Amino acid sequence: STVRAAAKTYTIGTDVTFAPFEFANKDNKYVGIDIDLMHAIAKEEGFNVNIKPLGFNAAVQSLEAGQIDGTIAGMSITPERKAKFEMSDPYYTSGVVGAVKKNSTIKSLADLRGKKVAVKTGTSSADYINSIKSKYNLTVVTFDDSNNVYQDVITGNSAACFEDQPVMQYGIATGLALKIVTKPAESGSYGIAIKKGDKHLLNMVNDGIKKLKANGKYDKIVAKYLGNGS
Ligand code: GLN
């Protein structure tokens, strides 16, 4: 009989609150599109995963330091990240939008001139805001998780927050008293980041994404969290 090596376990970092991609449900269990997708890829490819909700920036930093094997966190594929990590093939399209309090009169970036805006540390929203802050004379405040970013606007400390469109839409649909006032900027795709040099894991992840997209399981995962109309 053949002796088979035990399936390897990979440690994958994720964000703490980034619904519908990763969030703790009412039983305090981590669920979401990314969580289901990562488990489905592992099952398809015959490896085990240990998912760690470290927070976005911490997950990216841990991966860069080689302390974990990968990060799945609605992570946008960018040239900078492609230089630091192996980035998988794209699996979801996104862009950055600005949101204000539901009763706010702010309707555009121009209306934010001279005001305070909140973003999450290490994200493409933070990069975007830093790229336009001198043009609009913005003061940027940063937080490590999305909930604190939204709360800063709800409490009135910041005039707006900038966040990925599907996440902001989901948050508003599930009860956040905010509204989106800008068109998506910095549009791009989410990919899974793998430790630099681990082509074996990268190939398995890409192969898994391809199979799950072809066999309909990927669409089922997305529909489970967003419904068929999304
Ligand atoms: N897509 C954004 C980025 O990659 C935000 C990710 C996140 O906040 N989890 O920077």
Image: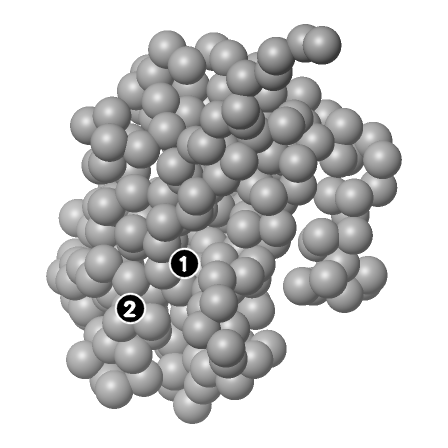
Read off the residue under disc 1: 163
Q: Is residue 220 above or below residue 6?
A: below
- Marks 2/1 in contact by CB < 8 Å: the verdict is yes
Q: Amino acid at mark 1?
A: Glu
Residue 50 lies, in percent from the top left, at 43, 43
Establish whether ligand 1 lies closer than 8 Å to the Cβ of label 2.
no
Left or right? Give the position of 18 relative to 93.
left
Judging depth in this view, the residue of 29 and 120 nearest the camera is: 29
In percent of width and height, residue 74 lies at 48, 46
Q: Residues within 10 Å of mark 2 (few under 14, many from 20)?
A: many
In what quadrant of the picture does the N terminus appear? top right
Residue 103: percent from left, percent from top: 42, 90
Q: Is mark 1 within 8 Å of ligand 1?
A: yes
Of the 4 image quadrants, the one containing the C terminus is bottom right
Q: Is residue 13 visible?
A: yes
> What number is the disc on residue 40?
none
Return the x and y of residue 131 as percentages of the image width and height. 26, 41
Of callouts 2 and 1, the N-terminal one: 2
* Disc 2 residue type (three-letter): Val
Q: Which residue is mark 2?
A: 149
Side (left or right) of 7 relative to 16? right
In the rendered structure, the answer to whether residue 124 lies left or right of residue 42 reads left
